[in-house]
Image (tube, rainbow, N blue to C red):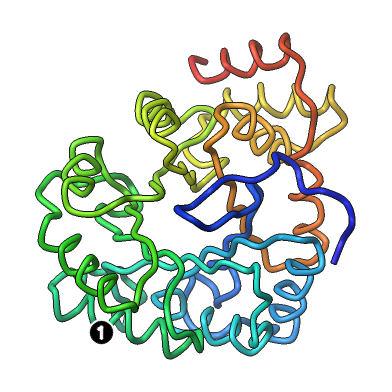
Amino acid sequence: MSDTPLPGGTFHLGDLTVGRVGYGAMQLAGPGVFGPPKDRDGAIAVLREVIDLGINHIDTSDFYGPYVTNEIIREALHPYPDDLHIVTKVGARRDDQGGWPHARTPDELRQQVHENLTHLGLDALDVVNMRVGAVDGPEAGSIAEQIETLAELQEKGDIRHIGVSNVTAEQLAEAQGIAEIVCVQNNYNLVHRADDALVDSTAEQGIAFVPFFPLGGFSPLQSDKLSDIAKRLDATPLSVALAWLLHRSPNMLLIPGTSSVEHLRENVAGAGLELSADVLTELDAVATS
C-alpha cells in the first residue's frame, strides 16, 4: 500500500471512514457497461492497484455487467482488506438490449441486495444506494416504500448503511424520515450545478455527496475554457474537474472510474492538484459560459 496520503483526507459514511478519493468500478464491465470486459486480467490489475494506492472506497453495482463488475471485484480482492468499504446500489436491472429499466418493488430490491451479497462474497453490504432517477436526472415521486424495504434489510443485518442516488432534495428529506441516510449520489460537476443547494445542505448535515460524470454535460465552449485552464496548469481537464470538486465542499467524495492502471494513477494524482483562489474564480465562471 502506498505511503503517500490520498488527496482530500477522509470523510465518514456513518461509522465508516473513507478516503475522499475513491474508485468507481462501472467501467470494468464491457462496452456500454454490458457484458464482460475485453481484458479481465487488466480489470483485476486495476482493482489491485486501487488497494495499493490506499483507496478504501469502491463504488459498484450488480447491474454493471450485469453481475460482471462485482464478480471481478470478488475475484481480485476477496478476502477484502479490513478497511475497504464497498458501496453498491439497487433499483434497476439490465435488459437483453443493455437498457436500464427500473426494478424497485420490495421483492426486486430484496433480491438485488441478496445478489450483491452473493456476488461480492459479503455477509453485509457497507452502503446500499437506492437509485431513484435515471442517468439524465431525478424523477419526482415518493420513495418511501423503497427506503422502508432497505431499512428492513438494514435491521436484519444485510445492510449497514443506506444512501440515495439520483434524488431531489424532497426525496432525500422523505428518506431521512424513515432511516438515516449517509450519502447522496447525484450528477454534479463544474458546470452541472443544479444541486448546489443540496451539496451545501448535505455538508451541514454531515452527509456525503458523491458526484458522478465529472466531465458530463459540458458545452463545447465550456470544454474549451476548461482545457485552456488545464493547459496553463500543466494538467488534464479531468484533473482540474476532480480537484475543483474536492475544493467545492468537504463532504464531496470522488469516484472516478477507469479500466486503466495508468489512468487510475493519473486520476488520483490529478485530484490533488492545488487550485489558487484566482483559478477557482475562473473555473466558477466556466459554468456560466
Provide residue 180's location: percent of width, then percent of height.
29, 51
Residue 76 sits in which quadrant? bottom right
Residue drawn at 29 percent across, 79 percent down: 95
Residue 115 sits in which quadrant? bottom left
Disc 1 residue type?
Answer: Gln
Q: Is residue 250 left or right of residue 115?
A: right
Residue drawn at 88 percent across, 51 percent down: 4
- Please, is residue 61 above or below residue 169 in the view? below
Residue drawn at 70 percent across, 83 percent down: 39
Provide residue 154's location: percent of width, then percent of height.
29, 70
Q: In this view, does 226 lie to the left or right of 179?
A: right
Residue drawn at 75 percent across, 69 percent down: 51
Provide residue 264's location: percent of width, then percent of height.
75, 59
- Please, is residue 77 above or below residue 248 in the view? below
Asked whether 15 or 163 is in front, the reply is 15
Residue 101 sits in which quadrant? bottom left
Q: Is residue 245 left or right of residue 268?
A: left
In the rendered image, which residue does mark 1 sit on?
Answer: 111
Q: Is residue 281 left or right of residue 141?
A: right
Q: What element carries label 1?
A: helix
CA neighbours of label 1 inside 10 A, class few (<14), some (14 to 19), many (20+): few
Provide residue 109's location: percent of width, then percent of height.
23, 75
Q: Quadrant of the N terminus?
A: bottom right
- Please, is residue 56 above or below residue 230 in the view? below
- Please, is residue 27 above or below residue 227 in the view? below
Asked whether 14 or 210 is in front, the reply is 14
